[in-house]
Image: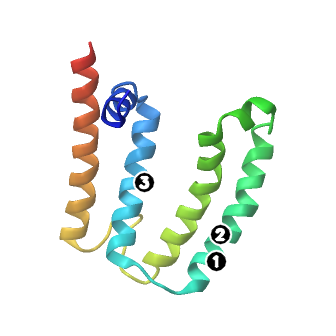
Amino acid sequence: MSLVNAVIQYLSTLSNGKLILWCYLIWYLNTVLYHFDASLSIWLNSAGISAVIGVALILSVGGNSAMRADKWQTFRLFAMPFCVSSFSSLIKGRGFVLIFPPSAPELASAVVLCLAFATIVVGLRQAQQ
């Protein structure tokens, strides 16, 4: 199976929950692109928080062998605290309201990218029926 076919297959069977998680990632990456800061302390602190909270999340879901078999879920349990922590550091003092940037172009690009991704997924789902 080619990579393109594998991606199409993955996207066409993507659950609504994972679609939302992908939109979270798109929103995060959009914010990083607009507000990247090369300060090592931001990224090291985020990595440290990710390690502590990631382990706590693994323990809270049981940390059983089935969990270890799902490497993507384990990755997400560590990636989410990293993203939340670095997002918080990057937007501090920049006029955000909750997660929404004060800049209309930045807000528009995040919304358009998420909507475009969701439209592609929904379109592929319908094409597979």
Crowding at mark 3 (Cα within 10 Å: few <14, some 14-19, many 20+): some
**Residue 4 lies in what quarter of the image?**
top left
x and y, in percent, of residue 8 in the image: 31, 31
Question: What colouring method underlies this structural image?
Answer: rainbow
Residue farthest toward the front in the current orientation of the protein: 1
Q: Earlier in the sequence, mark 1 or mark 3?
A: 3
The residue that label 1 is drawn on is 44
What amino acid is found at the position of numbered circle 3 in the picture?
Answer: Leu
- Give the spatial CA distance, label 1 vs label 3: 20 Å
What amino acid is found at the position of numbered circle 1 in the picture?
Answer: Leu
Which circle marks residue 95 in the picture? Answer: none
Residue 54 shown left or right of residue 127 in the figure: right
Cβ atoms under marks 2 and 1 closer than 8 Å: yes
- Give the spatial CA distance, label 2 vs label 1: 5 Å
Q: Secondary structure at mark 1?
A: helix
Quadrant location of the C terminus in the rendered image = top left
What amino acid is found at the position of numbered circle 2 in the picture?
Answer: Ala
Residue 93 shown left or right of residue 12 in the figure: right
Q: Secondary structure at mark 3?
A: helix
Residue farthest toward the top in the current orientation of the protein: 129
Residue in the picture at 38% in, 31% down: 6
**Residue 11 lies in what quarter of the image?**
top left
Which circle marks residue 25 in the picture? Answer: 3
Which circle marks residue 47 in the picture? Answer: 2
Q: Secondary structure at mark 2?
A: helix
Crowding at mark 2 (Cα within 10 Å: few <14, some 14-19, many 20+): many
x and y, in percent, of residue 34 in the image: 32, 75
Q: Is residue 37 above or below residue 55?
A: below
Residue in the picture at 36% in, 55% down: 26
Residue in the picture at 33% in, 64% down: 30
- Give the spatial CA distance, label 3 vs label 2: 17 Å
x and y, in percent, of residue 127 in the image: 21, 19
